[in-house]
Image (spheres, rainbow, N blue to C red):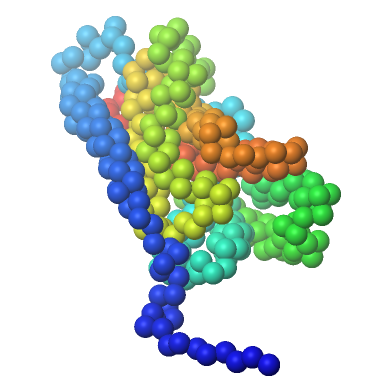
Amino acid sequence: TYEVVGDPSPIAWGSRWDLYLYMGDDQVHWFSILNSLVIVLLLSGIVAMIMVRTLRRDLAEYNSVEEKEELLEESGWKLVHADVLRPPPLAAWLATTIGTGMQVLCMSFISIACAMLGFLSPANRGSMLTVSLLLFALMGVAAGYCAALAYKAFKGAQWKSLTLLTAFLFPGIVLGVMFVLNFFIWGQHSSGAVPFGTMFAVLCIWFLISFPLVWVGVWLGYRGTLKDPPVKTNMVPRVIPSQAWYLHPLFTMLIGGILPFGAVFIELYFIMSSIWLQRFYYVFGFLALVLLLLVITCAEISIVLCYFQLCAEDHAWWWRAFLNSGAAGLYLLAYSGIYYCTQLEISGFVPLLLYVGYMALASLLFFLITGTVGFLACWWFVWTIFGSVKVD
């Protein structure tokens, strides 16, 4: 026989995890916030200079009756007014990408807000993933609605194809890769494999909850009204002149992706350590602030690059606006390779495959979030500046 003697603890029940959740490197997180703020302030200054000084001067010149004859031989963003709203190629794919990006963005904000308010306990490490999965399914309404509004602005007509693409394209890629990786885990007889019943439940959530909600969102977006376009589109597209080397799509993606990634890469180290090194991450207040700064950074860098592109008389800005800021996902993929070489000691084919697969999915979701924010910011910017200029 034996007996157990319990000593009363002065620690309250609700504070029992504080010892494990205490992170003594708060200064590093504050440095991450400061790093993001510096980038945001720098971009805000550039955007303010463009909006307040350059655009005001351009609008004053373009709207001046006396100088209209002189402007006929000049160049500038006003010259593409008849093509700036021309529907992009692969409009349904772009609308689907925007809708899914908004779906992931809404899921991220709500999940982090729930964790920040203490609704998700660190005692159950799978609670964050479960909540995120359910929120992703419920945010199918946002995906369908945003995709439908964008597709309507693109003057698209294949609404059934749009619904199927939004409901199955990117969710199918994510779930397909996860299921394939899970089969490899099964082959290793690991206890970390997802049971077949759980996989079937995820499929039921996808088909019975997410897909109907996407259909509802597309229906609501189709019935929604858009503002009248500020300019009319010509039947014949304007020829895009040869562009300078620094306006090449690859170079603008290089610049447009590094600043959003630079705003969050310090915090990414702690998140990846939590995932791959079994460490606790519970500073969701910092994470929420970093996500907000990421959104601002993506919006501002996309507006700056879009303005330079329009000034060069290149009216094909739709896809470029998405890819410029979305290139941050490529930087995340490259950083995951550096993290693997410097921080991890993974041996074996299956563990390496799991790391590559999951980080590729994380990079894809990051690409969708940052690209969607950049696209929406450029869309607002284009409608604003061309709605403020007089066009004959």
**Above/below status of 243 relative to 147:** above
- Of residues 278 and 59, which is closer to you in this image? 278
Residue furthest to the right in view is 187
Residue sitting at x 58%, y 43%: 362
Q: Which quarter shows the N terminus?
A: bottom right
**Above/below status of 92 relative to 179:** above
- Of residues 262 and 185, which is closer to you in this image? 185
Q: Is residue 3 left or right of residue 65?
A: right
Residue sitting at x 62%, y 39%: 345
- Of residues 95 and 223, which is closer to you in this image? 95
Q: Position of residue 31 (x, y in %)?
A: 30, 43
Residue sitting at x 74%, y 39%: 348
Residue furthest to the front in view is 1
Q: Which quarter shows the C terminus?
A: top left
Q: Position of residue 287 (x, y in %)?
A: 40, 52
- Of residues 148 and 282, which is closer to you in this image? 282
Residue sitting at x 84%, y 49%: 187
Q: Position of residue 160 (x, y in %)?
A: 69, 47
Q: Is residue 68 visible?
A: yes
Can you tell which quarter of the image residue 18 is in? bottom left
Residue furthest to the left in view is 66
Q: Is residue 153 visible?
A: no
**Above/below status of 234 relative to 144:** above
